[in-house]
Amino acid sequence: MEIIDVKERIGFSDKFMPRILKVSPEYKVPLICLEAGQLIEPHASGTGVFYIIEGTGVMTVEGEEREIKAGNMVFVGKGETRGIRAIEKLVAFAVHMG
């Protein structure tokens, strides 16, 4: 068992860089910390589950934009394009699988 204190890992920078919480051959768990206005350009990837910890933003999946906020969980299928734009300071984590 491993316990990670996510709040201790939160940090922001001028250019978005994910903070990897855990990685293995089967999955990757990045912490996403975006300042208002920062974004992750839409890109294809494996199956992803995103949980918004704090803030608000817009998630784009396969060209469809939806507002997201703290407490939301978003499921994205393998190969579907996804991106996030922060409306206000946003913290989320994702679990990417295959």
Image: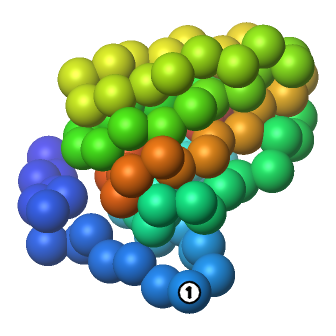
Q: Is residue 15 left or right of residue 94?
A: right
Which residue is outermost to the bottom? 14
Q: Position of residue 69 (x, y in %)?
A: 34, 28
Q: Position of residue 58 (x, y in %)?
A: 58, 32
Q: Amino acid at mark 1?
A: Asp
Q: Is residue 45 visible?
A: no
Quarter-of-image position of residue 98? top right
Residue occupying image coordinates x 11% and y 53%: 3
Q: Is residue 59 left or right of residue 23?
A: right
Q: Is residue 66 visible?
A: yes
Residue occupying image coordinates x 81% and y 50%: 41
Q: Position of residue 27 (x, y in %)?
A: 57, 40
Which of 93/22 is in front?
Answer: 93
Question: In this figure, which residue is indicated by the disc labeled 1?
Answer: 14
Q: Position of residue 70 (x, y in %)?
A: 26, 31
- Other residues around mark 1 within 10 Å, as few (<14) / some (14–19) / many (≥20): few
Q: How many numbered markers are drawn?
A: 1
Which of 5/15 is in front?
Answer: 15
Q: Is residue 24 left or right of residue 2?
A: right
Quarter-of-image position of residue 89? bottom left
Residue occupying image coordinates x 51% and y 49%: 86
Residue occupying image coordinates x 44% and y 25%: 68
| Mark 1 element type | loop
How has the structure been colored for display? rainbow
